[in-house]
Amino acid sequence: DGGITQSPKYLFRKEGQNVTLSCEQNLNHDAMYWYRQDPGQGLRLIYYSQIVNDFQKGDIAEGYSVSREKKESFPLTVTSAQKNPTAFYLCASSWGRDTGELFFGEGSRLTVL
Amino acid sequence: GQSLEQPSEVTAVEGAIVQINCTYQTSGFYGLSWYQQHDGGAPTFLSYNALDGLEETGRFSSFLSRSDSYGYLLLQELQMKDSASYFCAVTPNGGATNKLIFGTGTLLAVQP
């Protein structure tokens, strides 16, 4: 089965700790994205990557970091510099052409205590 | 900048037709997409309008008018399982592939 796998689904952390969210896809997609969703709100872009070893900041990149060492993987680190990290994090991937279609993972819900 | 506005909530009854509007302010974009998201789940792609006009996919249709800066999603023969949030999204011109900007979302409640 092809798809996008995010882990963990739920994560609790103390303030001041860095956390890394995993995102793996086996769809052979070139592009990958990280979005953040707050309750009752739309999705906001954190980082995106169009090819391996390259990534770009989205609209709310402060306090986050990513890497793209393999085509299949795009992990997101939420650092202690992120002032309000509690949120629902969604990873997505797409083909390397404009289709308007993103394939999303099931999300990771991070709660900082 | 770009912004996409949607009504926050819409309520309809089973079997009815409902239209969810999306108005936008953006200098240019490749196309308008629509996504469905059930509570706590992953957004799923519904449709994409690259050109003006109506696109039909089963019970769902989507419309785009660039001259009016407006689009909508039409859901027919509503079913209880259609209760979800719906988001419009655009990829701005000159941006990266499928680098979508999402609207505020509309929560659709389907009642028996």
Image: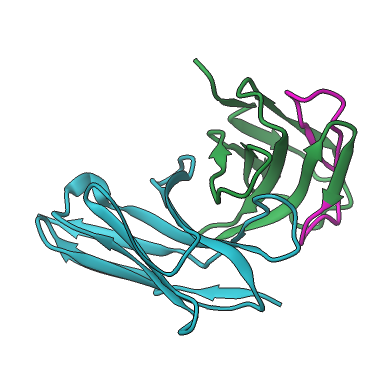
Chain colours: A green, B cyan
Q: Position of residue A6 (x, y in %)?
A: 62, 28
Q: Is residue B43 left or right of residue A94?
A: left
Which residue is farthest top?
A1
Q: Nearer the viewer, residue B57 or B17?
A: B57
Q: Residue at x 68, y 40 (%)?
A: A96
Which residue is farthest bottom?
B68
B37 vs B17: above or below: above
The reply to whether residue B22 is in sight is no
Q: Position of residue A9 (x, y in %)?
A: 58, 30
Q: Is residue A91 magenta?
A: no
Q: Which residues are magenta?
A: A57-78
Q: Nearer the viewer, residue B67 or B21?
A: B67
B85 vs A20: above or below: below
Please identify the dominant SS of the magenta region.
Answer: loop
Task: Please identify the quarter of the rendering in which residue A108 is found.
Answer: top right
Q: Position of residue A59 (x, y in %)?
A: 76, 62
Q: Is residue A72 magenta?
A: yes
Q: Residue at x 45, y 45 (%)?
A: B45
Q: Nearer the viewer, residue B45 or A37?
A: B45
Assign the C terminus of chain A to one quadrant of the image.
Answer: top right
The reply to whether residue B90 is in sight is yes
Task: Please identify the quarter of the rendering in which residue A28 is found.
Answer: top right
A90 vs B70: above or below: above
Q: Is residue B37 left or right of residue A107?
A: left
Q: Is residue B41 left or right of residue A44?
A: left
The mark tally for this picture is 0
Q: Residue at x 53, y 46 (%)?
A: A101
Q: Nearer the viewer, residue B10 or B64?
A: B64
Q: Position of residue B1 (x, y in %)?
A: 71, 77
A105 vs A37: above or below: above
